[in-house]
Image (tube, helix red, strand yellow):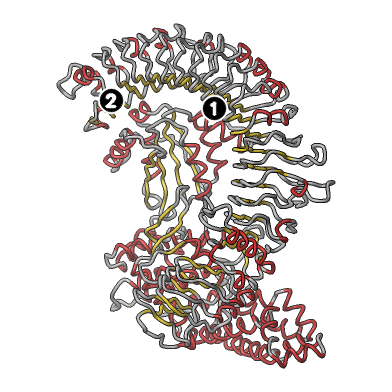
Amino acid sequence: MAEIVLAPMLQVVFEKVASRVLKEIAHSCGFNDEIQKLQRALRMIQAVLEDAEEGQATDKALKLWLTELKEVAYDADDLLEEFTPEALRQENDSTFAQQVSNIIPSLNPIITYLRKIPELTKIRQRLDLLLEERSCFKLKEKIGDKDMKRGQKRETGSFVIEPEVIGREEDKEKIIGMLLLTTERRAGRFVSVIPIVGLGGIGKTTLAQTVYNDERVMRNFELRMWVCVNEGFNLRKILNLMIESATGRRCDDLLGMDALQFQVRDLLLERRYFLVLDDVWNEDEDEWDKLKMLLKFGAEESKVMVTTRSAKDNLNLFPIGKQFVKKCGGVPLAAKTLSGLMRFKREPAEWLCVQESDLRNICEEENGILPVLRLSYSRLPSHLKGCFMYCSIFPKNSVIKKDELVHLWIAEDLIHHTEERRSLEDTGNEYFNNLLWMLFFEDVKKNDVGDVIECKMHGIIHDLAKSVAGEEYFVFEGGCMPRNLAKLRYLSVVRDSGSCTVPEALYSCELSFCYIQKVILVKSQLSCSQVSGCSDLIELPRSLARLLQLRHLIINGCERLTRLPVRLRRLKLKGELTIRKLENVKREFLAQANLVEKNLHSLELSWGDDHEGLNLNMNNDFICKMGENVLECLPPPENLKRLSLKGYPGICFARGMRTLKLPGLTKLELINCKRCDHLPTLGELPFLEIIYMRGMKAVKVIGREFYGEDTRRLFQSLKELTLIDFPDVELWWSISGGKEYQSLVKLTINKCPRLLNMPQFPSIKHLELRNCHEALLRSVVNVSSLCILVIDVFTGLLVLLDNLLQNNVNLMSLTISSCPKIRYIPPSLGNLVNLKTLTIRWCEELVSLPLQLQNLSCLQSLEICECHSLSAPPQSISGLISLKYLSIENCSHIRSLPIGLEHLSSLEHLTIMYCPSLVFLPNEWRNLSMLRSLCILSCPQLSSLPDSIQYVRTLRNLEIHGCPGLNVLPQWIINLTLLRSLAISDCPNITSLPDSLQCLTNLQRLSIQECPRLEEHCKKNIGDGWPKIAHIAHIYIGSRELKKENVASSSSR
């Protein structure tokens, strides 16, 4: 039985009645009173609408009243559309109206509107009659929605009084087993999350407390934290409580989020932690994603345990829940859907309301699952009912694209602004997530960053949507016509094969998954059209232009579609527009596109392949001229914020593009416009923040035309400028003595080998120069504001680097890479007292680093890679007191590590890789009190490990690979009591493990590869070394993985 949902529709009508445009028209035409009466009637009906919608299931007369109200609402909506300027223009296209407007132009709109006043009065009178009948049903006013009530807050801690959990011993042991279980680490994998889910009051928190305080758990984790989350998943609160639980100190409430996140990162870094999030009621996905990023800084095998409830603490919910279970009839889908609904209801009274008012309406003799599912639907908030009902328009078992669904909801006015600064798309995503959480969607597919991109509806859930949607929604399939065309307002057309013609009696608001040759659209009130997968579609109807309220037009997978209706220019499309393959478009079809009148904020025009553009012969003048003609016909609207041109084949930009009159433009992309020899005028755009240009192969000069005529205010807002692949550009003009780019913060120049000069950039902080001529450095040598500098792929000696470093003492990050001729890094490097990151890669002739390197007391990361002429590291690095990460890789002539290594008291990670000449390591290590990870890879001359490494008690990860010179693993390794991971590979001369290795109780992972004799020594159960490693949870020997069969029991011994 279809249910009538009117709240969204009445809200749409009310907003149109209250609109500024209608008020101005009413004032001009003298029907203000009529509009005010209509507003008053709508308010009074809205006040009781929620109660009416809830009561329709048991009161047939009330349902008839709602049916009449719905008809009035639709009639009002249709009539109010005729008061828009767009509708007026269409109506005045008639010959008579045109004649009147020619004689008395000012009377034209007034005459049109006055003709509609009697219809408006009739609608208001129908509403008044319904208001009089309202008293028969004793409807009550309802304010707000109680479905999302929250209970009283409660605080929990890890302390537990009871020594045991009565009746939960088995659950406790299972959880502890999962906590102690070691699993293989995969790239990008998040820490394991163990949920404890159940009704409130059953002892989830107590169970978590006993697990948290178990001795085996305490021994297994270096760090434990208990956080009581309660109702709001607030990241700041959670981070504060994590720090407080771990350190025993109250966190400073004045800390900014950035400082707070860094504190948590440092707290977790490479530490095996156990975090309990107790009493999680809901989760904000954005906040949870931010927390997950921080939790990844912990060591492998860290664990998070979450306790969450399905109802508020009240044992009276159990008998009510049993009644729900009975009504589900053993069908899991019904139970899942019903539980998804009840998760938002916290009060016993709300459960009783559902039981008493709804369950009794499910007749005992009524079989099947739909009655129970209809119960779940009936308790949805009104705004979600309309959105769910709309999903019946999708074919059964089809994939639903989330973004498209949200756009369709918006187009149908099912989404309304809840906050002034929040977009309709954001609100639509929230509606979608609510339905997803309540299990109305399934088979979710996510993108790389975890956002839902598509889903499906279970077949029975789709049946439910059709059941409640009634005759307003119809899927046209197999020639089957709807029973009542007068009530039909939403239609999708489906065809498995062949072709079909949609009858003129139908109109289409969404065409999906279909094979159609001709479509007839005859209604003008539609606001969204989608045509997808119609491979035989060759024409869209001219009547598409009559859809004056169309907000979303989605066309994809229609290979044979070659043209759009000429009168499409009437449509007031908004938002983003992307047009690809413009090389296939003829000028005569673009003459009336009229983009300049569209309310667009983003426009992308593309020719050829998105990455390379058109594969053109440079002499192909015909294609070039066609491209210029197309661009001439598509001038962008003035309110545009983002513009992207890709693969444009013309030699020059169209007249409207050469001097852009886009005062609101904030971002411009010009990509692979390979034949353009001049850039458009951009300097006078007051809000332009980002310019990205790539593949402009014919540009030789960035000249005056780039700036414009008004030299007083050039590039006022420009923050980022990128030039990539300008192979012929030689000259970059400066016309204001360095004042053109006062706001520029980031500049990237790449693959501009002939460019010899640049203007001045007084405020630049981030500079990247790649694949450029060394002379270009002259233009930036006097810059003094840099924080980040990247020098990449320079073939010269970089003689100007010294001056550049001297002038930029605030530099925080320096990268020098692929500079094969550079032999020395200048001593001025030592002046960079704020430098935090230094990376030197692929500098084959670099022979030394300056002694002044040790002056960099703020340096945190030093990486030296592929510098084969570097025979010795810096003579001393003892001054690098902040260094946390040191990596020396593939430096074939380095024989020893730098002097002063033992003074790096902040060092946490040390990596030495592919250094075939390295003979020995420094003798003194005991001051490296923060070192957590030591990796030695492919150092064949290395014959021993220094004894003093045993005093690095913080070491957690030790990896030795490709060191055939090592004959033995020293006995002192058992002193590394915090060691958690030990990996040995390609060390064929190591034959045995140290005695008493079993004393390393924190060791969780052991890997032995390509060490034949050592592998034999450690064979499971039979090797002499097996007893030494049997306690380790995760063992790799050769290509096989060996695990303890009973991790929990062995850990408890």
Q: Is residue 82 above or below residue 831?
A: below
Could you say where residue 156 lies in the image, as x and y percent from the top left? Answer: 47, 41
Point 36% across, 13% down: residue: 975
Quick check: can you spot residue 135? no
Answer with the quarter of the image where residue 426 lies: bottom right
Could you say where residue 566 lies in the image, as x and y percent from the top left? Answer: 60, 76
Point 53% across, 9% down: residue: 900
Could you say where residue 562 lies in the image, as x and y percent from the top left? Answer: 51, 71
* Residue type pointed to by label 2: Ile
Neighbours of disc 2 within 10 Å: few (<14), some (14-19), many (20+): many
- First reached walking from the N terminus: tag 2 or tag 1: 1
Point 43% across, 79% down: residue: 474
Q: Is residue 938 above or below residue 598?
A: above
Query: Quick one: quadrant of the C terminus?
Result: top left
Quick check: can you spot residue 434? yes
Q: Is residue 878 above or below residue 238?
A: above
Callout 2: SS: loop
Answer with the quarter of the image where residue 477 lies: bottom left
* Residue type pointed to by label 1: Ser
Q: Is residue 495 above or below residue 308?
A: below
Q: How many marks?
A: 2
Point 35% across, 67% down: residue: 397
Could you say where residue 676 lies in the image, as x and y percent from the top left? Answer: 65, 51
Callout 1: SS: loop
State the residue position of label 1.
Answer: 818
User: Could you tell me how far apart the alpha carbons at marks 2 and 1 are, in whole angstroms?
Assistant: 44 Å
State the residue position of label 2.
Answer: 1032
Q: Is residue 414 left or right of residue 679?
A: left
